[in-house]
Image (cartoon, helix red, strand yellow):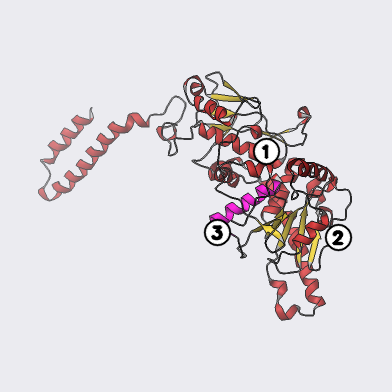
């Protein structure tokens, strides 16, 4: 029996119902009729598609249609140092965003070889960073995809990146624009070949990179190691404060041992390979503000007055490349320097590949109450960028002349007060050039 016949029978039945109850039944019947009609209208759209997804899960309905879930970009293995890899990853994400595509999860490099590329050990992105948290934090801006999402219904479109001086930024951008149309756009996957992403021409502003870096959170097992190292640093700070209080016989007077424990992190570039590199760099560029000796760094850091002393100074340094182990000696009174060996955390680092060691140190520096680095170091630049992003999110666009928290300094540049230069990233920069290759043009806003 059809729906319409059922309705007619119900209407006919109303004639035999007493007047007081008729209005109530009529209203209920009208509601039922309305629901039946509504279902008839929308049921075709609620049908399950051949792929097993409902209408609401399909890619045709997306609150952020600029990030397509059925089109992908694939890039070569990302190589070199941790922060070069982070820049390369962000550049690949932004390229995929420009093409309105998801980026297929790339391989990073666990080892560090600049010339012997064949010796690089690939490591999956999600072994270092949290895949799900990245997509959640960057939702609607960029999207990372797994290879299992690719249907392989079409052949990948190979996009060959140009090289040499003739391959200008404009030519590269024109190539990307052409890849948004025609054959390239019709392919499920655009496979980028040639140069790896760090060497691609840069078309994106600093604020876009900052947003992607802010979406990167360490994998849980690596985050656990970061917490262990910071805990050791703070334990050392508590011990130093306790000993200082006892020596001055004032533990119960000022309650200093109950204050929160803070620390300074110094990215100390004095390794032998760096000193050779930076001296040549200074000669080529005719600059005198790239290299700093151990004594110069200690002198600059000692002039920072942001934190109450005694304070622990954590030295982020490649211990294996040092010519001697005296980096913790020679510091001023009230500044207790620790590196990995003295802090007794070498076991945490020794069991990790190069990339993860660097990732742990990056977070320890990024979370410090005060950070001091070299403005010609990519590592230092990205630490300061992450701290600047956090300050901007707190509504603080300047650190000039005041302690705003999360202070950063460049020890290789002399500030107005004769100490290290206060340092915040210029978030209005149109590219990442200065952060990638270093600059002596830094300021506190």
Whichever of labels 1 and 2 marks the residue nearer the N terminus, that label is 1
Q: Quadrant of residue 73?
A: top right
Tag 2's secondary structure?
loop
Q: Residue 251: image x %, image y %?
A: 75, 78
Q: Residue at x 83, y 43 (%)?
A: 276
Q: Residue 431: image x %, image y %?
A: 58, 41
Q: Which residue, given by chain and number where applicable, does mark 1 sit on?
A: 85
Q: Residue at x 13, y 41 (%)?
A: 14
Q: CA distance from mark 3 to mark 1?
A: 29 Å
**Viewer-closest of 288 and 23:** 288
Main SS of the magenta part reads helix
**Where is the N terminus found, in terms of image quarters?**
top left
Label 1, residues with CA under 10 Å away: few <14, some 14-19, many ≥20: many
* Residue at the right extreme, as displayed: 324
Please indicate whether residue 333 sits to the left or right of residue 191 in the image: right
Tag 3's secondary structure?
loop
**Viewer-closest of 202 and 251:** 202
Q: CA distance from mark 1 to mark 2?
A: 33 Å
Looking at the rendering, the stretch of residues picked out in magenta corresponds to: 379-398
Whichever of labels 3 and 2 marks the residue nearer the N terminus, that label is 2
Q: Which residue, given by chain and number where applicable, does mark 3 sit on?
A: 396
Q: Residue 374: image x %, image y %?
A: 72, 51
Q: Which residue, given by chain and number where applicable, does mark 2 sit on?
A: 329
Q: CA distance from mark 3 to mark 2?
A: 36 Å
Q: Residue at x 54, y 37 (%)?
A: 143
Say above or below: 153 vs 420. above
Label 2, residues with CA under 10 Å away: few <14, some 14-19, many ≥20: few
Q: Residue 267: image x %, image y %?
A: 74, 52
**Where is the C terminus found, in terms of image quarters?**
bottom right
């Amino acid at each position: 029996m059809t729906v319409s016949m059922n309705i007619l029978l119900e209407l006919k039945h109303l004639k035999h119902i007493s007047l007081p109850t008729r209005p109530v039944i009529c209203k209920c019947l009208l509601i039922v009729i309305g629901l039946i009609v509504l279902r008839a209208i929308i049921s075709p759209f609620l049908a399950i598609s051949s792929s097993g997804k409902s209408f609401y899960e399909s890619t045709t309905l997306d609150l952020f249609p600029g990030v397509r879930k059925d089109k992908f970009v694939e890039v070569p293995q990302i190589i070199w140092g941790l922060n070069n890899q982070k820049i390369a990853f962000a550049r690949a994400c932004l390229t995929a965003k420009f093409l309105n595509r998801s980026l297929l999860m790339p391989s990073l490099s666990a080892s560090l070889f600049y010339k012997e590329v064949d010796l690089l050990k690939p490591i999956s992105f999600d072994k270092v960073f949290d895949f799900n948290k990245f997509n959640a934090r960057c939702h609607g801006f960029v999207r990372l995809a797994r290879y299992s999402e690719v249907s392989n219904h079409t052949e990948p479109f190979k996009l060959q990146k140009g090289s040499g001086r003739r391959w200008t930024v404009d030519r590269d951008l024109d190539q990307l624009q052409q890849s948004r149309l025609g054959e390239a756009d019709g392919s499920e996957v655009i496979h980028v070949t040639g140069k790896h992403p760090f060497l691609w021409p840069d078309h994106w502003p600093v604020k876009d990179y900052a947003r992607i870096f802010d979406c990167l959170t360490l994998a849980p097992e690596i985050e656990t190691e970061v917490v262990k190292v910071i805990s050791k640093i703070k334990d050392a700070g508590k011990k130093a404060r306790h000993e200082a209080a006892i020596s001055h016989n004032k533990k119960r007077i000022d309650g200093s041992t109950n204050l929160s424990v803070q620390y300074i992190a110094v990215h100390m570039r004095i390794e032998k390979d760096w000193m050779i590199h930076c001296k040549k760099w200074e000669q080529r560029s005719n600059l005198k503000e790239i290299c700093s000796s151990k004594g110069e760094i200690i002198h600059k850091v000692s002039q920072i007055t942001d934190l109450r002393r005694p304070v622990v100074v954590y030295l982020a340094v490649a211990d294996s490349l040092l010519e001697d182990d005296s980096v913790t000696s020679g510091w001023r009174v009230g500044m207790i320097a620790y590196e990995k060996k003295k802090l007794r955390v070498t076991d945490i680092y020794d069991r990790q590949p190069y990339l993860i060691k660097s990732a742990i140190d990056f977070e320890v520096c990024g979370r410090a109450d005060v950070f001091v680095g070299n403005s010609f170091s990519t590592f230092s630049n990205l630490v300061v960028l992450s701290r600047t992003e956090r300050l901007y999110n707190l509504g603080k666009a300047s650190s000039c002349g005041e302690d705003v928290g999360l202070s950063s300094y460049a020890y290789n540049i002399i500030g107005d007060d004769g100490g290290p230069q206060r340092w915040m990233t210029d978030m209005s920069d149109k590219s990442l050039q200065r952060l990638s290759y270093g600059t002596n043009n830094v300021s506190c806003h």
